[in-house]
Image: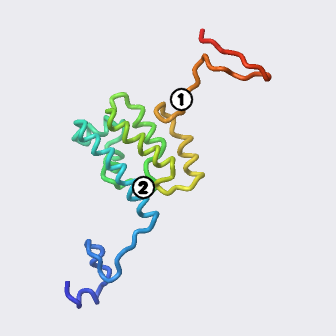
Amino acid sequence: MDTDQLLKSPTDSIAHGGEGLFPKRSSPVASMKARQSAKIRQIGEALALAGFAALDEQAQALGLPRSTTWTILKGNHKSSGLSATIINRMLSMRRLPASVRAKIVEYVEEKSAGLYGDNRARLREFTARVTTPELRPPERSSDQTLRSSGRCRRMSAK
């Protein structure tokens, strides 16, 4: 690149992959969002590795419309990431390959841990809205000790 071109527009080279005079610095939020986008792309990669190459097949496997699937897999999703509704819909699909399910669960665990930069209130709301068995704490067995009126008693399964 020659000097005249740099003087005309020092930031043009940044837009075209170079550093220009003023290289962009990565902010913590930008790196969190990049991590989130990478995890979402891994969901698409897992789908392809499981044999779902065509968009129609991927949409059917995820239980989503084609347009939503395209947006997610191309990384053009909104900056807040995948909603609890979309995640619940994907995880409810019985034919979803285990490797894809695992990537979605990893995404939810990372998002719930705050690795993608949401505030605590939004994280609590998100975590409360994800209603899939994979992400719920283990249920107590019916033979577990319960405390009632200061005494312990055992509940037995009928």
Q: Residue visible at 51% across and 39% down?
A: 130
- Determine whether, in the image, residue 80 is placed left or right of residue 94: right
Which label is found at residue 31?
none
Q: In the rendered image of this protein, does residue 85 appear above or below residue 21?
A: above
Q: Amino acid at mark 1?
A: Pro
Give how far apart the Cα atoms at labels 1 and 2 are.
32 Å
User: Hey, which residue is sitting farthest left in the picture?
Assistant: 1
Of residue 107 and residue 16, the one placed in the foreground of this image is: 107
In the rendered structure, which amino acid carries the disc numbered 2?
Answer: Lys
Residue drawn at x 27%, y 78% as measured from the top left: 13
Find disc 2 in the rendering and name its residue. 78
| Mark 1: secondary structure | loop
The residue under the point 35% across, 81% down is 22
SS for dot 2: loop
Instruction: Kindly identify which residue carries mark 1.
Output: 138
Q: Earlier in the sequence, mark 1 or mark 2?
A: 2
The picture places residue 31, in percent across and down from the top left corner, at 41, 62
